[in-house]
Image (spheres, coloured by chain):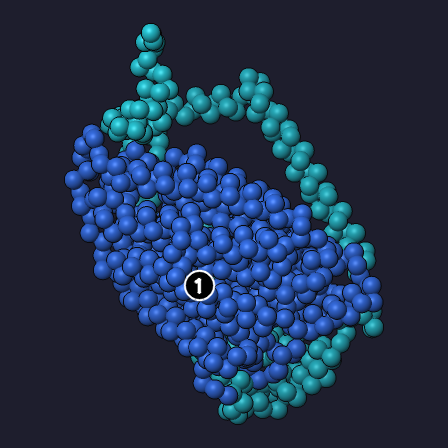
Chain colours: A blue, B cyan
């Protein structure tokens, strides 16, 4: 067995060990350890990606002595390795970019706890990406939920506590539905390993057995994961959770955590239940409709938001809507577009949050729009980063967001005839709405101040880490926009590998 | 001959030309560009609490007699949630009624997976207790994750509830300062019971591979013993042998040894290297390879976590 094949397992366990060892440490040491661990995970995932691309096939890794249906195993294909690389990189950038905010907003004797949460969150993200077993997926969904909840409430201001409570309630409803679905799925198939469930599922469908439980299972699992990822009617926890937590948490939660559930859902669609059965069950149409509503409603709420963090948070609702719309098209092109948009959104939304924090620092920590006027002159890098992020979200060519919108539009043309027109119209409307609120903010931060206030002559210099993080995310944005073809090919290949 | 309109200043055309000429700031004026009121914003928050008479607003909103909208919303909200819950219950019951019968020998979950656990479990993993075999050896990764769930839950409770030690010392109103309770019966019985409880907890942990039990249940028993002790004799006496430092050491020690064991197990298992931990004879107390040490680590972690939950909720510290 090649050494590289150990890397997915190592990166999951490494994060856990880093979290455990951070317990007795001081905040500074825990920070160093976490950053080292996340960097190592990024490198290991990159090497895994290169290895999988070079061999051209996925591999399974037995977690322990016993082979798959009896023991646990994880599986790494192109898509898994790519998502792990991007997620770890975005995690690193988010932590670096918000580091001073973490040390400022979290109580001094609890900073190391923040890094424990971050480490375990990354390990659970990786495990959800790599898992080949449904119950392992559930265990790590649990870790993910608790860690995310802790990352919201560690700021301990009134609103973040309320946000954490809301997040916990919604997220636990989602987990509960997901677990009920898994239990019933185990009951009718007798397996938890994805391939074996898929095999018996095909047998059951052929024989026409258990049709009603199957329908309930599909809908319960889908709705559970959709609640957890914040699809439109279940989005009410998002603005508070993203708007009032410390900025690294906002970036990580919006960019990565809600996406990990979508990835688990896609995995279940392809590898557990089978995409044909899913399409025949019509559940994708439900996702499609709510995705479309979310695209518009999220943007409308973002236009009405009064402070910059909440605006970005509402924008996330619209972007989740995009992803579900792509899944709902029920074609492979739609799925490729959805996965590409997951990557785009992870890269762009964390950039926007970091930039908003830079602008906020340059405006005396005030977050409402009037106070942000001219902030881009006071903190040029944050202004530029916000500009790039906004243009990418709106969908300006050369940036990642343009490619995902293009992919969505092309995928819509290939979808069933009754979905083409409505998708294109909503896509256009949503793009215009995106432009309204993002460009409105961009113009605002680039408008010179007329009435000087005490903070208008602050000139903020960001820390080295934050500068590096912002540059890295900007480069990623341009990179994904300019070299999209190899990336989409890889995603397509990865999705084909799923089946 | 054209006539100048009286309200030319406000006409659409005039506004457009001024906007094109750049005389008017498109943001100035109507939208939200009223000049900032200096006292309006404090710190990070959007609203200044002084500006709003919150109680008055809350009173008005809560008064459902005046606020009919609120009342309608509440009634609608509760009706909808009850209806949704009933619907969900009905759907799930319907689905359950179509599921295979429980305990059916020909049911789908009586397959080769459980057969191997039952038939070969003892000889492959070395423990007499089948369930322990399955959760700690066959599906060891899941259980490692489950232990991390416990660890992170404890971390979250600490985030939420731990106070600084001097803050706890200064709090005059807390009742734990009046501990230990002057209750002779409770103290005598506790002195008799606690050693037995601890002993039984250790027995469950150490025999986890031989009889029903294991780290999770034994740890819970020990944790309950600790809680009984602290309720009877108070925190000052407990802190002599169990304080935050010792908690951290036990937790980090147990969990890191557990992780090392698991990494070794994963690595040797996946790379087909021979596992150097001897399995021993099934039935002996020192047998079953790595299951016994893992039970001990899990037991320590669970016992500490139980006690810490209690202490944090009661006192805000250990």
Task: Indicate the quadrant containing the C terminus of chain A: top left, top right, bottom left or bottom right.
Answer: bottom right
Q: Residue lying furthest front in this view?
A: B1
Residue bearing the label numbered 1: A484
Instruction: Give the residue displayed 18% in from the left and 32% down from the top.
Output: A452
Above or below for A52 versus A474 = below
Above or below for A130 versus A344 = below
Instruction: Give the residue displayed 48% in from the left and 77% down from the top.
Output: A53
Percent across and percent down for residue B99 are 79, 60
Instruction: Tell me, yes or no, if residue B107 can be seen here.
Output: yes
Percent across and percent down for residue A208 are 82, 63
Percent across and percent down for residue A308 are 36, 41
Instruction: Give the residue displayed 58% in from the left and 20% down from the top.
Output: B68
Q: Which residue is more in the foreground, A32 or A156?
A: A32
Chain under disc 1: A
Percent across and percent down for residue B47 are 35, 31
Q: Which residue is more in the foreground, B87 or A489?
A: A489
Q: Which residue is more in the foreground, A222 or B77?
A: A222
Q: How many marks can you see?
A: 1
Instruction: Tell me, yes or no, if residue B201 can be seen here.
Output: no
**Secondary element at image label 1:** helix
User: In the visual, does B141 lie left or right of A367?
Assistant: right
């Amino acid at each position: 067995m090649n050494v590289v094949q150990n890397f997915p397992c190592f990166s999951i366990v490494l994060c856990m060990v880093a979290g455990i060892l951070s317990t007795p440490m001081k905040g500074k040491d825990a920070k160093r350890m976490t950053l080292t661990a996340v960097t190592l995970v990024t490198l290991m995932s990159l090497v895994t990606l290169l290895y999988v691309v070079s061999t051209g096939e996925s591999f399974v890794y037995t977690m322990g002595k016993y082979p798959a249906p009896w023991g646990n195993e994880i599986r790494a294909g192109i898509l898994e390795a790519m998502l792990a690389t991007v997620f770890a990189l975005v995690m690193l950038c988010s932590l670096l970019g918000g580091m001073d905010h973490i040390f400022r907003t979290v109580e001094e004797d609890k900073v190391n706890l923040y890094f424990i949460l971050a480490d375990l969150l990354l390990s659970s993200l990786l495990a959800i990406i790599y898992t080949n077993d449904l119950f392992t997926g559930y265990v790590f969904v649990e870790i993910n939920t608790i860690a995310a909840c802790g990352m919201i409430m560690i700021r301990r201001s009134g609103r973040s506590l309320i946000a954490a409570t809301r997040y916990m309630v919604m997220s636990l409803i989602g987990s509960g539905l997901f677990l009920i679905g898994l239990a019933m799925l185990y009951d009718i198939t007798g397996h938890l390993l994805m391939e074996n469930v898929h095999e018996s599922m095909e047998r059951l469908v052929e024989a026409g057995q258990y049709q009603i439980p199957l329908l309930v299972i599909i809908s319960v699992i889908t709705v559970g994961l959709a609640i957890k990822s914040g699809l439109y009617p279940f989005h009410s926890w998002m603005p508070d959770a993203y708007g009032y937590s410390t900025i690294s948490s906002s970036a990580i939660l919006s960019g990565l955590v809600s996406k990990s559930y979508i990835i688990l859902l896609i995995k279940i669609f392809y590898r557990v239940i089978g995409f044909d059965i899913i399409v025949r069950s019509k559940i994708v149409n439900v996702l499609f409709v709510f995705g479309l509503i979310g695209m518009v409603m999220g943007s409308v709420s973002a236009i009405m938001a009064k402070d910059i963090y909440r605006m970005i948070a509402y924008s996330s609702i619209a972007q989740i809507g995009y992803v579900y719309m792509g899944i709902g098209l029920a074609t492979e092109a739609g799925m490729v577009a959805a996965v590409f948009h997951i990557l785009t959104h992870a890269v762009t939304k964390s950039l926007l949050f970091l930039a908003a924090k830079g602008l906020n620092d340059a405006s005396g920590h005030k977050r409402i729009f009037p106070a942000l006027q001219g902030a881009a002159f006071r903190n040029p890098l944050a202004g530029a980063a916000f500009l790039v992020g906004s243009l990418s979200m709106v969908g300006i060519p050369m940036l990642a967001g343009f490619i995902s919108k293009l992919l969505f539009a092309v995928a819509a043309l290939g979808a069933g005839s009754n979905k083409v027109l409505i998708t294109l119209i909503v896509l256009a409307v949503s793009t215009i709405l995106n432009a309204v609120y993002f460009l409105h903010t961009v113009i605002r931060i680039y408008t010179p101040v007329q009435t000087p206030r005490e903070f208008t002559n602050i000139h903020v210099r960001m820390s080295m880490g934050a500068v590096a993080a912002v540059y890295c995310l900007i480069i990623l944005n341009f990179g994904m926009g300019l070299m999209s073809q190899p990336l989409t090919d890889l995603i397509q290949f990865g999705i084909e590998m799923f089946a | 001959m054209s006539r100048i309109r009286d309200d030319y200043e406000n006409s659409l055309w005039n506004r457009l030309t001024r906007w094109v000429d750049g005389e008017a700031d498109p943001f100035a004026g109507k939208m939200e560009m009223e000049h900032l009121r200096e006292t309006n914003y404090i710190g990070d928050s959007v609203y200044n609490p002084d500006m709003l008479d919150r109680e008055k607003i809350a009173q008005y909103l809560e008064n459902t007699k005046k606020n009919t909208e609120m009342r309608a919303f509440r009634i609608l909200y509760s009706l909808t949630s009850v209806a949704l819950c009933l619907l969900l219950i009905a759907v799930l019951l319907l689905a359950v009624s179509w599921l295979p019968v429980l305990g059916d020998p020909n049911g789908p979950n009586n397959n080769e997976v459980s057969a191997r656990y039952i038939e070969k479990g003892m000889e492959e993993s070395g423990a007499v207790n089948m369930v322990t075999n399955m959760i700690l050896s066959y599906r060891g990764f899941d259980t490692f994750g489950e232990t991390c769930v416990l660890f992170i839950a404890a971390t979250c409770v600490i985030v939420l509830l731990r106070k600084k030690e001097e803050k706890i010392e200064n709090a005059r109103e807390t009742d734990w300062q009046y501990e230990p309770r002057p209750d002779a019966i409770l103290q005598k019985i506790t002195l008799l019971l606690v050693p037995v409880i601890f002993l039984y907890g250790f027995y469950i942990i150490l025999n986890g591979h031989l009889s029903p039990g294991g780290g999770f249940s034994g740890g819970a028993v020990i944790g309950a013993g600790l809680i009984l002790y602290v309720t009877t004799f108070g925190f000052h006496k407990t802190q002599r042998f169990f304080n935050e430092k010792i908690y951290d050491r036990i937790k980090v020690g147990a969990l890191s040894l557990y992780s090392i064991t698991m990494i070794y197990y994963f690595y040797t298992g996946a790379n087909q290297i021979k596992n150097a931990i001897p399995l021993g004879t099934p039935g002996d107390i020192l047998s079953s390879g790595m299951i016994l040490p893992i039970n001990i680590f899990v037991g320590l972690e669970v016992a500490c976590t139980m006690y810490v939950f209690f202490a944090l909720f009661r006192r805000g510290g250990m």
